[in-house]
Amino acid sequence: MLSKKDNFYPMKKSLRYLSIIILFLTAIMAADQQQSIEEWEKKTFLKQPPEKVMDTAGINPGMVIGEVGAGRGRFTMHLAHRVGPKGKIFANDIDAEALAYLRERCKRAGITNVETILGDEIDPLFPKKSLDIIFMVWTYHYVAQPLPLLKNLPKSLKPGGTVVLVEPKPGLVYEGQDHGISPERMRRDAEQAGFKLERTEKYLEEDFIFILHLSVLPVTFTQSPQIFPPADTNHVGLGDFDGDGDLDAVFTNQARHHSQILINNGKGYFTDSGQKLTPQGHGAGIGDLDNDGDLDLFITCAGWTDKDRISHKRPSKVYLNDGLGHFKDSGLDLGDTDLSGNGINLIDIDADGDLDAHIYYYTVTENPFYHLIYINDGKGRFKTSDIILPKGSLLFWGDLDKDGFVDVFLMEWEKGLRALKNDGKGKFSECWQLPDTNILYGDAAIGDLDKDGDLDVIVGNREGTSEKPTYVYLNDGTGRFKNSGQILNPTKNPDFCLADLNGDGFLDVYVSNFRAPNEVWLNNRKGQFIDTGLRMCGDDPTAKISIGDLDGDGDPDVFVSFYGDGSNSIWLNDRK
């Protein structure tokens, strides 16, 4: 009779044999799967011959290629051989299992110039400015959001880079659907993503080959590692306060936080100067207020109520610079302590050669915004003027009719848009209006968007809904505007800032959204804007922004202010 121990050894031996059999069968199945996959690929190559397709795409030895939707490597293997050991393939997919198979396949074949990247549905996550060609075969028509994907490609291309898509012709039905992409649709999508459809090759039996080149220069940003202590900042203003040739910063900090002056080391790193300016800061005006050749400050203060429901009020402040970045309170009393100064614009409203001040105040009423103009005597002393501007509106300043005097563009809540012409003495008359009940307080920015010599306007609402998108209004040169027909992304309590972000000589748009990602829209050199797909700052409560060359490398960077307990942030332009 066998003991329990004697019974155990035959059982253990049987289990060992069973494990070997299972491993053997698994290996056979894997080999069969591998053979099945690669046999299927050979059949597809009869209709999509790799060498011919790669010739059309312009893929040559030594190139760096990004392949979107590489899958198990049907084209990847051919791309890797074509670019050779001096080239590289970044093989992207959203299927981790397929990429694992591809890595093993490359290992079996001795291929070492392929790097897999697990991306997401709208961003392949290729490295920035590194690719000669982005290549995709039978991928674009499968993607749930193809246009956002296309918008995310420019940031990865080298200058002069190309996107090549092999996509089915219309009329090719499989899985019960026509998945074809027409040249007309490809041209339309390409233009919206900042590309131009250069040519369409039609020689394949079932597919088009689309060749896209960038129509706008791409731009990307990298966040600076500098972290600023939370200060509940409403506005970051920029100017060379100490006269050393670089841009310094002022933080207008809210509530109990004192506003600050920060000095730039010339490389984009800022150090607090230790000066404690007024708390409850909200708006910042920077300019030579006393005509002594340096930059002074005009800070508006907003009222606030603390947790004990105690109301705190402060007047606006004028600080005069000694030329070295040290600021002194001028002692000016505008008599606006009981008012809540939301923001300020410095403008020469009476055309006498010095900077006057427009302050917009906020009240919790049916028409929350109202405006006062303060006239400068040329020495930084201001007096309230009798100029009357419409209540319940947001005002934006610029010479709209090219007569040399600063005019005003208005957004009026649920009423519409208006332009008022200045007679040079601070008297305004209406020269254009557009009734629009969808207009809500948001933001506008004025600049020559189509580069025809006059000032145009971009207007965004505050709601962040598709029913209230952003529009561009082009000026006819006389202060009268026409909707350009563009329907741009809706915005959420936005702050627009215009600057030539990509160095092509045309004004682009940086959009700060409140509790929604910031966006970058590039000008196509015709006054039309392309969403780059860049999304920055997450859902942070970002507020006002300023743009300037912070690190001294010749391109414009972005300084973003942060409401609440977060850090203001610097985003450095990667253009150079």
Image (cartoon, helix red, strand yellow):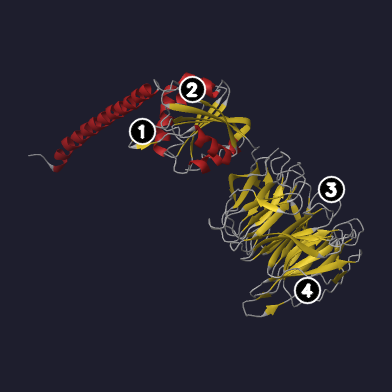
Residue 175 x %, y %: 33, 36
Sequence-wise, the earlier of marks 1 and 3 is 1
- Dot 4 lies on which element? loop
Residue at 57 percent across and 41 percent down: it is: 192
Please name whichever residue, 26 or 418, is drawn nearer the observer in this view of the structure: 418
Select label 3 or label 2 by which is in front.
Answer: 2
The reply to whether dot 4 and dot 3 touch (C-beta < 8 Å) is no
- Which residue is rendered at x = 65% and y = 40% of the image? 524
Check disc 2 and report the residue beneath it.
53
Kindly identify the amino acid type of the residue bearing the numbered disc 2. Val
- Estimate how packed mark 3 is, as few (under 14), some (14 to 19) or many (20 or more) residues with alpha carbons within 10 Å: few
Residue 337 x/y as whole percent: 77, 76
Helix, strand or loop at label 1? It is strand
Tell me where residue 326 appears, x and y as whole percent.
85, 61
**Front residue of this view, candidates 529 and 115:** 529
Residue 202 screen position, x and y as percent? 48, 24
Q: Amino acid type of disc 1?
A: Val
Q: Nearer the viewer, residue 441 or 151?
A: 441
Question: Mark 1 and mark 2 in contact (Cβ < 8 Å)?
Answer: no
- Which residue lies under the disc numbered 3? 245
Residue type at tag 3: Gly
Q: What's the residue type where badge 4 is placed?
A: Pro
Res 561 visible: no
Kindly report which numbered mark, 1 or 4, lies closer to the viewer in this rendering.
1
Viewer-side label of 4, 3: 4
Give residue 386's quadrant in the image. Answer: bottom right
| Residue designated by label 4 | 315
Disc 1 and disc 3 in contact, CB within 8 angstroms: no
Instruction: Using the numbered discs, state the Cα–Cα distance from disc 2 to disc 1 in whole angstroms.
Output: 22 Å
Q: What is the spatial separation of the Cα atoms under label 3 and label 2, in whole angstroms?
A: 53 Å
Q: Mark 1 points at which residue?
A: 173
Contact check, label 1 and label 4, Cβ < 8 Å: no
